[in-house]
Image (cartoon, rainbow, N blue to C red):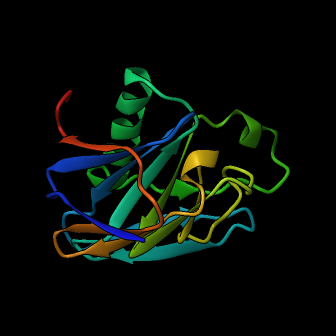
């Protein structure tokens, strides 16, 4: 099953699961993002204007929606670097949100948050696991069953 969802660069798409959510925004313009990895390498990720910035939260509610917006804002507008923790880092267990950037994002509940430098996979709650989110000119195409989502202005609380 595929679902096309249209939204603009000034909007955020929230995919709502049973115990978590994923917020998705467009990169908005061509840019470079830097990814710091555990082995001291820095990866440069080139983004096109319609590439995706996806932020996954393991909780629901307004507080976490604001957190998702904030992390997406820091990544997209401030161009803060993305940091990848080593596999057994104790802080991995404490992460409330994680993010991924690129042309597509696969949601998977079977990975350890914060331990994947690959930007095409993102830890999610069980009910969103298995979805593949692919950029499109006017939004995204989601492969898999989307049960609940909403679109809101991205800068609603800034």
- Residue 140 pos. (x, y %): 29, 67
Query: Along the line of sight, which residue is nearer the eye, 70 or 104?
Result: 104
Give the residue drawn at x 44%, y 75%.
45
Instruction: Classify residue 1 as left or right of residue 10.
Output: right
Residue at the location (64% across, 37% down)?
Answer: 95
**Figure check: 40 above or below 85:** below
Q: Is residue 89 depicted above or below 129 in this figure?
A: above
**Residue 119: where, in percent of width, then height?**
54, 69
Drawn side of residue 82 relative to residue 9, left or right: right
Left or right position of 67 against 25: right
111 horizontally vs 23: left or right: right
| Residue pictured at 26% horizontal, 51% vertical | 77
> Which image quarter holds the C terminus?
top left
Q: Is residue 58 above or below residue 88?
A: above
Q: Residue at x 20, y 27 (%)?
A: 157
Q: Where residue 44 appears, x then y in whole percent?
A: 47, 75
Nearer the observer, 77 or 48: 48
Q: Quadrant of residue 25?
A: bottom left
How many numbered marks have been drawn onto this rendered protein structure? 0
């Amino acid at each position: 099953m595929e679902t096309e969802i249209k939204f603009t660069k000034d909007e955020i798409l929230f995919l709502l699961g049973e115990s978590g959510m994923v917020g998705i925004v467009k990169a908005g313009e061509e840019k470079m993002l830097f990814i710091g990895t555990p082995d001291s390498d820095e990866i440069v990720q080139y983004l096109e204007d319609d590439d995706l910035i996806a932020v996954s939260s393991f909780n629901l509610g307004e507080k976490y929606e604001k957190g998702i917006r904030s992390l997406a804002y820091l990544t997209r507008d401030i161009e803060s670097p993305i940091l990848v923790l080593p596999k057994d880092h104790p802080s991995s267990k404490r992460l409330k949100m994680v993010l991924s950037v690129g042309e597509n994002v696969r949601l998977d509940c079977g990975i350890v948050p914060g331990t994947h430098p690959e930007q095409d996979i993102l830890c999610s709650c069980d009910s969103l696991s298995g979805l593949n989110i692919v950029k499109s000119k006017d939004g995204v195409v989601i492969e898999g069953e989307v049960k609940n989502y909403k679109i809101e202005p991205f800068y609603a609380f800034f």
